[in-house]
Image (spheres, rainbow, N blue to C red):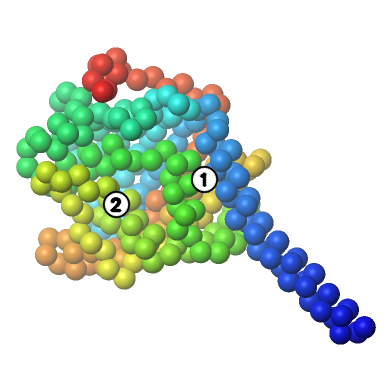
Amino acid sequence: MKTKQILSLLAVTALALSVRAAEPQATVTEAVKALKTKANYSWSTTSEIANSQFPAMTTKGKTEKDGFTYITSEGRNGEIQAVKKGTNGVVKTDGDWQTAAELQAGGQGGPGRGFSGRLLTALAPAEDAEELLKGVKEIKAGDDGSFTADLTEQAAKDRASFFGRRRPAQGGGGFTPPEPKDAKGSVKFWVKDGVLTKLELKTSAKITFQEEERDMDRTATTSISDIGSTKVEVPDDAKKKLP
């Protein structure tokens, strides 16, 4: 009898521990889903590379469910704009709006064009967090409404390139970010009232840049705001250019 009682107690304890371990994962997953269902929202992402000659970059965006996503960022030659709808997108630097194919065909490949193209493959925070969740290890709850997790080796590698999230291969001689080595990463989620409100991604890796291998520690912090009250205004010439 005592043996049965002990086994039952161990089983109940194991189940309780399993449920508690699953709670942070479920909380973050549901918070990401909740944000994804919102009619609209805005965000701002600041990306910093420690001990780098490059200044911190800020990307701002607005998105609407099943509608347009409008993203802006500062490049070396001024503001870069991108407009996306579904799988289609156009980008504008210092000239006319261009599709990904036109951007790829024009000029020589290089980091500048790679940065412009990066906006065309950039994800809104809900989709970005959803992708990150596929590559996390155990999620742990913090004391400030936050949840943290380390990335798997592959997920860290996918996020530790020079421009952050690695772009899908497009061919045509475009700029390809160097392959990261010894990549590690972690992600932190903030949840308020059941909705994702902030996201912080940290990665470290060895990157070959200008024929020199360097340690690169990158932090990208995304703050989400104006959930349900964002108005996405897209330039008419960008709408006309979309396929």
Please give the residue where the numbered disc 2 appears in the rendered image. Answer: 166
Q: Residues within 10 Å of mark 1 (few under 14, many from 20)?
A: many
Name the kind of residue labelled 2 in the image. Answer: Arg
* Residue in the picture at 27% in, 42% down: 118
Q: Position of residue 70 (x, y in %)?
A: 36, 28
Name the kind of residue labelled 1 in the image. Answer: Lys
Q: Residues within 10 Å of mark 2 (few under 14, many from 20)?
A: some
* Residue in the picture at 79% in, 76% down: 10
Q: Nearer the viewer, residue 74 or 238?
A: 238
Q: CA distance from mark 2 to mark 1?
A: 21 Å
**Quadrant housing the C terminus:** top left
Image quadrant of residue 217? bottom left
Q: Position of residue 36 (x, y in %)?
A: 52, 36
Number of numbered discs visible in the structure rendering: 2
Above/below status of 176 relative to 40: below
Residue found at the very far right of the displayed protein: 1
Please give the residue where the numbered disc 1 appears in the rendered image. Answer: 198
Q: Nearer the viewer, residue 145 or 2?
A: 2
User: Which element carries disc 2, helix, strand or loop?
Assistant: loop
Tell which circle, 2 or 1, labels the residue nearer the N-terminal end: 2
Residue found at the very far left of the displayed protein: 108
User: Which element carries disc 1, helix, strand or loop?
Assistant: strand
Above/below status of 134 relative to 32: below
- Evaluate whether residue 162 shows in this view: yes
Q: Nearer the viewer, residue 132 or 95?
A: 132
Q: Position of residue 28 (x, y in %)?
A: 58, 50
Q: Is residue 141 left or right of residue 149?
A: right
* Residue in the picture at 22% in, 43% down: 115
